[in-house]
Image (tube, helix red, strand yellow):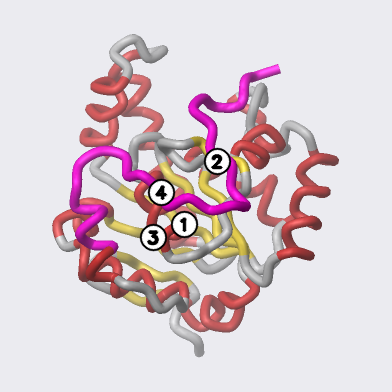
């Protein structure tokens, strides 16, 4: 019987054998509670040469095309059931499948929409970030003291994301790399070695570890095929 999971110092991998089978043609979904350091995962993927979108937010590297297709204006209670613009989402996925052997995107709130998006994706692999919910809530409030619902809402959303992650362990819909971000930041080189092995990428982990050890958002390398935006795509 295939192992259901594999523990590493900085992460838990569910369905590890299936991950190995599909990772060369995978769609990588970087998600988790807001302020759970999904931006760091996006930066690592980008610096490793992965395609995570051609229209990216300059700071947090969120995929602006995918963000507009699946998330904007979808009520929270309906997020898991449907995407905002199914036709645009389908076209975008087909285009990227045709252009890239493997691709991915980073949207934190995609953690709450997995049932609605996974069936449309080729060989999906979830990359879920996990932090202590109190640390996540503190980061949300520090960044935006006027956030709707305040500290309680930020803490509750972090808890809700962790509950979804628990479901990825209990009844995994596809392989998942669940990263303990507290360990990842305490031991960046260990994390990067484990992560690069998990996704099957050869990278300068020493140089990358030095970059992610610095506080705050990191500056991504310029690519001719990528446009960076200062602000998120406006809601319509």
Q: Which of marks 4 and 3 is nearer the N terminus?
A: 3
Quadrant containing the C terminus is top right
Helix or strand or loop: what does disc 3 sit on? strand
CA gap between label 1 and label 4 equals 7 Å
| Cβ–Cβ under 8 Å for marks 1 and 2 | yes
Q: Mark 4 points at which residue?
A: 220
Q: Earlier in the sequence, mark 1 or mark 2?
A: 1
165 up-or-down from 33: above or below: below
Q: Earlier in the sequence, mark 3 or mark 1?
A: 1
How many residues crowd mark 4 within 10 Å: few (<14), some (14–19), many (20+)?
some
CA gap between label 4 and label 3 equals 23 Å
Helix or strand or loop: what does disc 2 sit on? strand
How many residues crowd mark 3 within 10 Å: few (<14), some (14–19), many (20+)?
many
Q: Name the residue under label 1.
A: 46
Q: Mark 3 points at which residue?
A: 178
| Cβ–Cβ under 8 Å for marks 1 and 4 | yes
The residue range painted magenta reads 208-236
Residue drawn at the location 59% of the way across and 48% of the way down: 226
State which mark lies toward you, 3 or 2. Answer: 2
Q: Mark 2 points at which residue?
A: 56
Helix or strand or loop: what does disc 4 sit on? loop
């Amino acid at each position: 019987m295939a192992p259901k999971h594999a523990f590493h110092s900085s992460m838990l991998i569910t369905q590890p054998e299936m991950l190995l089978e599909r990772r060369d043609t995978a769609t990588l979904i970087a998600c988790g509670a807001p302020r759970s350091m999904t931006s760091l995962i996006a930066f690592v993927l980008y610096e490793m040469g992965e395609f995570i979108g051609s229209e990216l937010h300059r700071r947090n590297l969120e995929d602006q095309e995918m963000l507009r297709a699946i998330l904007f204006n979808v009520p929270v209670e309906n997020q898991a059931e449907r995407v905002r613009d199914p036709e645009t989402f389908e076209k975008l996925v087909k285009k990227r499948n045709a252009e890239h052997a493997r691709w991915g995107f980073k949207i934190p709130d995609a953690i709450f929409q997995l049932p609605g998006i996974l069936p449309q994706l080729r060989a999906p692999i979830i990359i879920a970030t996990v932090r202590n919910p109190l640390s996540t809530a503190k980061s949300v409030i520090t960044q935006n003291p006027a956030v709707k619902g305040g500290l309680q809402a930020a803490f509750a959303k972090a808890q809700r994301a962790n509950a979804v992650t628990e479901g990825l362990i209990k009844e995994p819909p596809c392989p998942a790399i669940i990263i303990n971000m507290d360990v990842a930041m305490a031991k960046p080189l260990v994390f990067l070695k484990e992560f690069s092995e998990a996704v099957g990428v050869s990278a300068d982990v020493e140089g990358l570890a030095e970059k992610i050890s610095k506080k705050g958002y990191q500056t991504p390398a310029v690519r001719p095929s990528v446009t960076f935006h200062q602000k998120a795509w406006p809601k319509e």
